[in-house]
Amino acid sequence: MENELIRILKEHNLKVTKIRLEVLELLIKSGIAMSHSQISEKLDSETVDKVTLYRTLNTFTDVGIAHKVATEDRNWLYAIFEKDAHEEAHHTHEHAHFICDECDKIYCFPIEDYVTEIQHQQKMGFQIKTKEVRLHGLCPVCQ
């Protein structure tokens, strides 16, 4: 797995560091969006300071390895794009966020049909500045 993590960082012209490897591996393995504090709890807190973790997460977001989503209480959650999405144009990756009402985990779902409809609306003259789709319900674990 470490070779894959190094490959992803190098493809995005990022220096390979211990923190970047650890955060990237955690985001890939988690499969869900996680807050800064959740990520910090899972990592060795003695070797990772808050500022370095924020910078790492923002760098991943800036280069398209990960994305962030705001929760209802205006906190940020970070998630990795699905496998191999880092090879695509990262800023055009469209998806919905499913929020489990029981455990509060957030999952990313593809929404190709919705994107097609938005593209149609833009052709009709609508100027869409931001797009966000949120789905609420119960995840398979909480059902």
Image: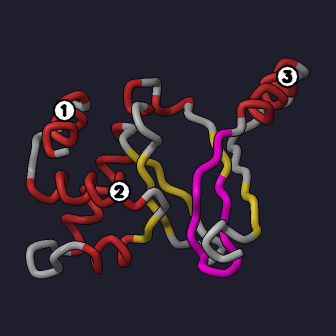
Q: Which label was assigned to residue 7?
A: 1
Of the residues tagged 3 and 1, which is closer to the observer? 1
Q: Residue at x 71, y 38 (%)?
A: 111
Q: Position of residue 96 (x, y in %)?
A: 67, 49
- Residue 99 occupies which quadrant of the picture? bottom right
Give the amino acid at mark 1: Arg
The C terminus lies in which quarter of the figure? Answer: bottom right
Residue 102 in the figure: left or right of residue 68: right
- Residue 102 occupies which quadrant of the picture? bottom right
Residue 83 sits inside the magenta stretch = no
Q: Residue at x 37, y 76 (%)?
A: 38
- Residues shaded magenta: 97-110
What is the spatial separation of the Cα atoms under label 3 and label 2, in whole angstroms?
Answer: 36 Å
How packed mark 2 is, by other alpha carbons closer than 10 Å (few <14, some 14-19, many 20 or more), is few
Residue 76 in the figure: left or right of residue 28: right
Q: Are marks 3 and 2 in contact (CB under 8 Å)?
A: no
Q: Is residue 58 above or below residue 63?
A: below
**Element assignment for label 1:** helix
Q: Which label was assigned to residue 120?
A: 3
Residue 108 sits inside the magenta stretch = yes
Q: Residue at x 48, y 61 (%)?
A: 33
Q: Position of residue 83 (x, y in %)?
A: 42, 37
Give the amino acid at mark 2: Lys
Q: Which label was assigned to residue 29?
A: 2
